[in-house]
Every structure is written in structure tokens, then in C-alpha cells.
Amino acid sequence: MSDTPDLRLYLVTDRALGRGRSLVDLVRRAVEGGVTIVQLREKQAGTREFIGLAEELQDLLAPLRVPLVINDRIDVALAVGAAGVHVGQSDMPVAMARRLLGERGLLGVSVSNIEEVVRAEADGADYLGVSPIYATPTKTDTVTPVGFVGLSSLRAATRLPLVAIGGLHADNVIPVIKHGADGVAVVSAIMAADDPCEAARTLRARIDGARGSAR
């Protein structure tokens, strides 16, 4: 993809954390607070339900110029005209995902070591999700936490934008940015918040402050 979008505050959805609240409303409030990109992650939904949720979010986000990324399901992303897809190491191979998306689709890839970084970049990734920074119950398919030293080493290994994820919240995002992340992805820090707008606003302010001081 020629123009990588603003990855500063990346929301990954999890309806189970929303305590029965409307997903669209939660995302709307999060975007009002400063979320710059949204990934719809639905591991349990059937295809029709997944498409319905994706259509609702695309209708909300497209007029706001906030990209919607679909976790894993390229068919869903293409069906609703989403900005792109994010794949993990056990999902569709990156090179195959790139062929299906085409050159203009946004393609994110989860990585946790330098070998995965090099392979993802060579196969056409636009950005990399580095995970987990800390251990977290929302990411059950990952290995030992990367930590700040690991994040710094991955930063040195690629020119692609890095989005850190895993156990991140307002109290620990600043050092993540200072150790090389271009953006921060959160799940529970916004999805489980009593006020998603205020939670996003606090996160965005701290990320922006850290980015400014790191330059």
C-alpha cells in the first residue's frame, strides 16, 4: 500500500469486553477520543454475522476517514470494502494475502522475532504488529513477551511501521513509543473502559506526547 495510515492509536475490538454495549457505539466513542484505526477481531462469529458487523463499522468509519482493518478474514475485508486485513503467524501466508488484497490493500502482520519481521517485509506487509509487549489474556496465541529490548531490536531490523500490542494501557504506553513503536494497539484499555472516549483521549495524549519527545 502506497500510503500507510495513521497508526498512532490502534483499537482492536473484542465484544466480550463491552459488557453488552453496542460495538458501533463503543467504536464511535473511541474514535471521538482519538483512535486512528480500528481492527475488527471476531474469532467466534459466523461469516454472515462477521460481515454484518464489518458493514456497520465501515459505514461509521469511512465518512470519518478512519481505516477499518479486518482480522484474518480477507473475504470479509473485500466484501465490505475495508481498508485491509491483519494476519497472524498461523493465518494465511503473507504473500498469499498480498496477492488477494492487491497492491492498494493495507496488510498488517503480527510478529514477535526478527525472522518473522524479515519474512513479513519481504512478502509485502505494510506494517507490523509486535506482540506481546507484556503478557495479556486477550492474546493467547503468542509466545514469551517481547519486552522493550525486543521491541528495540525489531525496530532496528525494519523500516516498516511498528504497532506494539499486548498488555498496554495509559500507564505504560510512553516507554513503548520511546523504544521504537510508531503506534500502540489496545483492546481492553478501551473496550472495557466505562468511558471509551475518555480512555482513548488519555491514551492519545500520552502517545502524542511521547512521540514529540522522542523526535
Image: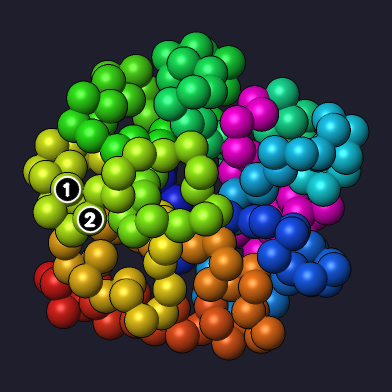
Lateral position of residue 96 relative to residue 183, left or right: right
| Residue in front for this viewpoint, 59 or 203 | 203
Residue at horizontal 57 percent and vertical 67 percent from the top: 188
Residue at horizontal 44 percent and vertical 51 percent from the top: 5
Label disc, if present, on residue 147 of the rendered structure: 2
Instruction: Tell me the kind of residue under disc 1.
Output: Gly
Name the quadrant containing residue 125: top left
Residue at horizontal 52 percent and vertical 55 percent from the top: 137
Cα–Cα span, label 2 and label 1: 5 Å
* Residue 181 versus residue 144 in the image, above or below: below
Asked if disc 2 and disc 1 are in contact, CB closer than 8 Å, the reply is yes
Provide the residue span drawn in magenta: 56-74
Name the quadrant containing residue 182: bottom left
- Tell me how many marks there are: 2
Residue 206's spot in the image, x, y percent?
A: 34, 81
- On the image, numbered disc 1 is attached to which residue? 150
Q: Is residue 98 visible?
A: no
